[in-house]
Image: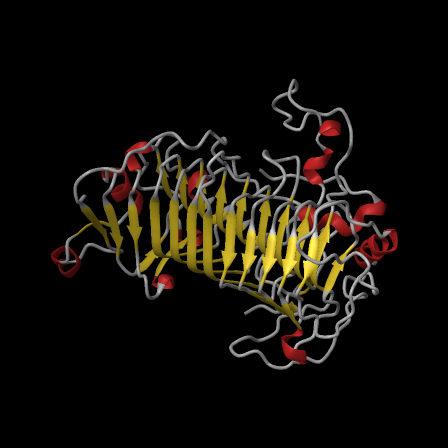
Amino acid sequence: MRRTIPITAALLALAVAAPVASAADYPLPDKPGTPQPKPSGKGKTFKVCPKLTKKSKKAGCKYTVVQKAVDAAKAGDTVKIADGTYGEGVIVAGANKRYLKIVGNVKSPQKVMFDMKKIPKKVKYKSKVKGGNAYNTQIQNAVAINSANEVTLNGLGARNFKGNGFFVVNNTGYTFDHLWAQNVGTYGIYAFNTIGGTMKNSEASYNNDAGFYIGQTPPQEKPIRTIVSNLKSWGNVLGWSGTNMKYVTIKDSDFYNNGAGIVPNALRSEKFAPPEFNTIINNRVFLNNFNYRKGKIPFLVQSSSTDGVPYPIGVGILLFGSQTTTVENNQIFGNYLLGFGALQQLLLSVDDQPVDKADPSGPKVKDMVEWYTLRGNKVINNKFGNGGANPNGRSIGYDGNGTDNCISGNDLDNEPTVPANQGTFVPCPFTGANVFDSAAQGEAVGWVASSDLEANWLKKPQAPVAGVTPLEHGTLR
C-alpha cells in the first residue's frame, strides 16, 4: 500500500497525496461483505494481566500474553486487558473472531500500552493465526484485524510500531473507541478496504504519515457510512489522510498542529477512486503549521516526503480530486498558508496504463480521467479566522476546476482568497461547469515550488487556544 508519486516541476504543489502505508507486511485486500452472523449467547471473558500474581489470579487473570487470549477466544467473546505495558503485536483474523471485544482502560487508554520497543527478540508464544505471530509481524501493528467483522477495540494505547497503531482491513463493520496512538511508522489509526465502521473518542500524535486514515472504500449500492467523531489528531505530517475513501462522516473533532489538517485524496495506486460521498462537519481545524522538516522531531520522516517534494504545510482542509464531498460548519483558523483548498488531481498521467495494475485488461487511465476531477463538492457555512483572533493566511483557495462545485454561506473574516476576486466561487446549490482560473492554479503551484516551505505563509499574530501549544518546528518532547 506504500506508493510513490511521479512529480513534475509544474505540479509540485500537489505532492500532498504522497505515500500510503509503510513497508509493513499487510494482508492482501480481499472482498469485504461476506456474511458473518452475530453469534448467539453472552460470550466468555478472557482476562490478561502483565504478571500472574496471587492477586491477579484471584481477579480472574489467566494470561499474560494478549495474543494467547485472543487465540483462545471465539466469536462474541471479550478479552479484558489489565493496566500495564505489553511487548507484542496482536492479530485478529477470520470469521471465528467476529464480534470479538478487546477492552483495556476506557478512561485512560495509555495505561494499557502496546509498545514495540518492549517486544523480546525471542517470541515466547507463536500465534495459531495463519501467518503466525513471528517477530517481523509483531513489530508492524499493535493490533491488526483482518476479515473479522464487528471487532471492537476500546481503551488501548500503542507506540513505536513500524507499521501502524491500530489497523483493520477487509472488514464489514468495526468499532475503534478510546484508542491512543503515537510515534508509529505510518498511521496511528487506520482502516483499509472496509465497509462501514466507527472511530471515536481517540487521539493520534507524532505519526510520520497521518494520525487517522480511511482508504480504498469499496463502492456500495446501499452504502453503509463510516462515522468518525470526537478525535484529536496533532503533531502528525497529516491529521487525516484518506485515499479513495467513501461514505465517511468526520465530525466534532480537532485537527491541529499537523503539517496539514484533513486531506482526502484521489490516487490510482489504490482501488475505487475517487474519494466521494464524504462529509466533513462541525470540526475545528486549526494551527496546522507543523514544519516537521525543521528541528528535532520524535519520528522518522518518510523518504518519499524528503527525497521528493514535501507535503504543503500550513493547510487546514484540502480536497484533492474529491467528489460529492460536503465541508460544512467547520471552524477553520490559524493555518498560515490556507484554510480550505480544492484541487483537481493533476498528478494523473493520462496514458494507456490500467487503473489497476493487477488487472491489465481492465479500464485504462485515459478513459477514467473524470474520476479525478472535482465534482459536486459543497463548501458551506464554515467559519474562518476564529472571529479575527486566529486568522488564516488565506481563507479559501479554489481554481475553478471541475463541475457542480459550490462555495457559499462561509464567514471568511475578511481574509484573502485565491483568486482574490473570488471569481471561481459559485453559490450553492449549483450545477454546471465551473469557471477555471489558470492564475489561481499557478499561485497554488508556486506555494510548494519554493525551497522554503514557509515562504508563502501569511503569518499573523494568533490568540492563545485553550489547551494547545502551537507547534511550528520540531522539538523533542
Quarter of the rendering occupied by the C terminus = bottom right
- Residue 156, located in which quarter of the rendered image? bottom left
Q: Nearer the viewer, residue 247 or 434?
A: 434
The reply, left or right, for residue 166 in relation to residue 324 is: left
Image quadrant assignment for residue 341: bottom right
Q: What residue is at 60 percent from the left and 54 percent from the top?
A: 326
Residue 431 screen position, x and y as percent:
70, 47
Residue at the image point whose x is 64% and y is 21% from the top: 362
Judge left or right: residue 201 versus residue 421: left
Tell me if I can see residue 450 in this picture. yes
* Outermost residue toward the top in this view: 361
Residue 326 placement, left or right of 47: right
Q: Quadrant of the N terminus?
A: top right
Q: Position of residue 392 (x, y in %)?
A: 70, 71
Q: Position of residue 73 (x, y in %)?
A: 23, 40
Q: How many numbered discs?
A: 0
Q: Nearer the viewer, residue 413 or 230?
A: 413
- Point out residue 464 in the picture as x, y percentages from the top left corner: 60, 81
Q: Is residue 40 above or below residue 310?
A: above
Where residue 108 sits, quadrant-wise, is bottom left
451 or 88: nearer the viewer: 451
Q: Residue at x 85, y 46 (%)?
A: 10
Q: Please name the colour scheme applied to the rendered image.
A: secondary structure
| Residue 139 makes an appearance in the image | no
In front here: 324 or 171?
Answer: 324
